[in-house]
Amino acid sequence: MTGTHPPLASAVQSSRAQVGASMSDAAFTAISGLAKSEAGLILPVGKMTMVQSRLRKRLLAIGIEDFDSYVSFVSSREGEAERKSMISALTTNVSHFFREGHHFEILRNQVLPGLLARARRGERIRIWSAGCSSGQEPYSIAMCLLEAAPDIARYDIRILASDIDEAILARAEEAVYSVQQISGLPEPLRQRYLLTGPTPDTVRVARPVCQLVSLRQLNLLGQWPMRRPFDVIFCRNVVIYFDTATQAGLWPRFHAALQPDGWLFLGHSERVSENAHALFTSIGMTAYRPTTAVAR
Ligand SMILES: C[S@@+](CC[C@H](N)C(=O)[O-])C[C@H]1O[C@@H](n2cnc3c(N)ncnc32)[C@H](O)[C@@H]1O
């Protein structure tokens, strides 16, 4: 069949050749400026190769031949949808089931007993996975809830799982993972909460787990429409991509979004910054509580 459509083949080839062209410094500066203003993402010059390779796919997808034209397009009003796709391409979505297992130990042993006692008294319990990526974090939390209380569906307990990236939320909604992606899941949990997936090397998370999780698109830099506070917030491996000023702006907001006796879990290389040291007290490895709760 090669050569059947020479004009199309040569058009694709010439477009590949053009897209292969390097990104100018000006284009990189404009793209990193947009990534910061739209999503808080910091892209230092050292990430230029990564940015080029991730965005090359976008240029090919929409038929734009060079990065300067791409910058003009994503900066325009007509380029709004592509701006979202650009942010989606620039976010890092790596996640695992039961990542940073010490947080799940704290959840099981120190947090859930109290939350379940309150739920059994009819209270409303809310957990937020902020920057949930493809869903492994909220589904791990949901499995912990089911392990602690198999009748959890009777109670008013929900997990909000949010992310800026609609494409990755669609993957979370699907709840289908490759066999490699479930390597962190202990065998008994696989038996109880995973079903055969749509293809031989995939699995699907079972309904009782998914039903505890509500997925929603939310930019942490924008408005947070949730009115009532959370009992637990997981925001792990997200603020590491933000600069210190953006991080500093988030801690008082997380504090306000938490119950006075709540819990905040961050990623292993993240810390509550100095401006919020009075608000939060560290309870060991990147686990925090509002200082008022600890002082009681
Ligand atoms: C590395 S993943 C972390 C996933 C999970 N929390 C974990 O620790 O495994 C970071 C996620 O943060 C999301 N993210 C980045 N900037 C964001 C923003 N401004 N608002 C909301 N989510 C954001 C990305 O889309 C990505 O899915």
Image (cartoon, grey):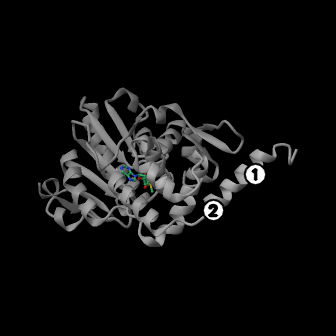
Task: From the top left corner, tell me how far across and down residue 133 is, in percent.
Answer: 46, 48
Residue at 36% from the left image edge and 39% from the top image edge: 160
The residue lying furthest to the right in this view is 1
Task: From the top left corner, tell me how far across and down residue 220 is, in percent.
Answer: 31, 49
- Which residue does the numbered mark 1 point to in the structure image? 10
Front position in the image: 50 or 126: 50
The residue lying furthest to the front in this view is 7
Front position in the image: 205 or 214: 214
| Sequence-wise first label, 2 or 1 | 1
Give the structural element (helix, strand or loop) at label 2: loop
Question: As drawn, is 21 to the left or to the right of 221?
Answer: right
Disc count in the image? 2
Question: As drawn, is 251 to the left or to the right of 87?
Answer: left
Question: Foreground mark, 2 or 1?
Answer: 1
Task: From the top left corner, tell me how far across and down residue 18 is, in percent.
Answer: 63, 59
The three-letter amino acid code for the residue at tag 1 is Ser
Q: Quadrant of residue 159?
A: top left
Query: In 3D space, how far apart are the residues under numbered discs 2 and 1 (Cα atoms)?
Result: 15 Å
Front position in the image: 154 or 4: 4
Question: As drawn, is 179 to the left or to the right of 250?
Answer: right
Q: Quadrant of the N terminus?
A: top right
Front position in the image: 165 or 176: 165
Does mark 1's beta carbon lie closer than 8 Å to ligand 1? no
Give the structural element (helix, strand or loop) at label 1: helix
The three-letter amino acid code for the residue at tag 2 is Gly
Establish if 296 lies above or below 286: above
The residue lying furthest to the bottom in this view is 46
- Which residue does the numbered mark 2 point to in the structure image? 20
